[in-house]
Image (tube, helix red, strand yellow):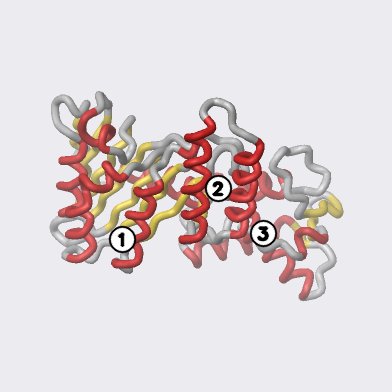
Amino acid sequence: MKAKIQILSNTNYALAEVIKSELLESNKVNVAVAFLRKTGVNQILNALDYALTKNDAKIEIIVGLDFKTTDYNALISLEKIKSKYPGFMYYCFGDKRDNFNELIFHPKIYLFSNAIPNNIKYTSIVGSSNLTGGGLSSNFEVNAVFRETKPVYYSQLEAIYNEIKFTDSVFIPTKNYLKKYMGVRKDIDQSGEKIESSVKHRIDELKREEEQLPGPGPTLKKIIVGIIKKKQEEGLKSVPLKIIYEETERIVKEKELGFKMDTFRNSIRGELNKHEQNSKHPDNKSLFIRQSIGNYSLTDIGETYESR
């Protein structure tokens, strides 16, 4: 069966109605949006409750913090849902000023699936709508909705979602972090166009706290660090790239981390090159030493590395 494709603008049919309908029929939901507001959460709250209680759904939301635009009250709403339902989890993607890769996080992806026999369906939504009141109903937006029984478009968007989920910038916020986030957000709002040095200092503090918070799973560089450390403890002075490939692939498959496997070895080499002690990459953490071609050990920083 070919995918049924629908294009929405909110003027012909509100995206909120599509999302609520899909939540009522789904047992797995993944969402990644740049911005979140309580007005958006409120519009789908009852449908979220139904999916989590009646469908025993597993729901994840990744929300961006770029420019501190995401509403603190919306994050508190997600925190309350998380504490109430074991099937719900949310993550934050660090502000461009705070994250590790200088990307502006700007996707709007909504994924719904139902694996019930004789009623298997996959629905994907991608477009311009953030999880805000305006994005879901009152703004002029453009979104494509794909409905499939075989996950073609869904699988492609799910791969992108997983790529987002396991980047360095994604972390699990704590209640203490949320309080500090609210303070920084208020300071930015009061500062206007010119951010005062005291506010910049608080942003730096927030960044340092983000670095110590756990992510949804180990990042690729963290996995590689663990492999090299283990092999060195077993007696290898330097670890061949072949072993790093094989061990990393094994761990990722065992833990079902969702990395894109067709280009995975390129990703491994990329992490080794980026974080090699002599690398000029701006995000270099100086974790690895290239002892010879295709052989790696850990720096002192790598030996004690505890962050994501």
Checking the image for residue 81, the label placed there is: 1
Mark 1 Cα-neighbour bin, 10 Å: few <14, some 14–19, many ≥20: some
Mark 2 Cα-neighbour bin, 10 Å: few <14, some 14–19, many ≥20: many
Amino acid beneath label 1? Ile
State the residue in front, 190 or 36: 190
Q: Is residue 77 left or right of residue 216?
A: left
Amino acid beneath label 3? Ile
Residue 40, how many percent across, how many down?
A: 27, 42
State the residue in front, 54 or 192: 192
Mark 1 or mark 3, earlier in chain: 1
Q: Which residue is mark 3?
A: 224
Q: Quadrant of residue 39?
A: top left
Q: Residue at 64% of width from left, 59% of height from top?
A: 307
Asked if residue 283 is positioned above or below residue 220 in the image, the reply reads above
Q: Quadrant of residue 58?
A: bottom left
State the residue in front, 249 or 43: 43
Residue 172, how many percent across, how many down?
A: 48, 58
Give the spatial CA distance, label 3 vs label 2: 17 Å
Res. 163 in view? no
Q: Which residue is mark 2?
A: 169
Give the spatial CA distance, label 1 vs label 2: 23 Å
Give the quadrant of the N terminus: top left
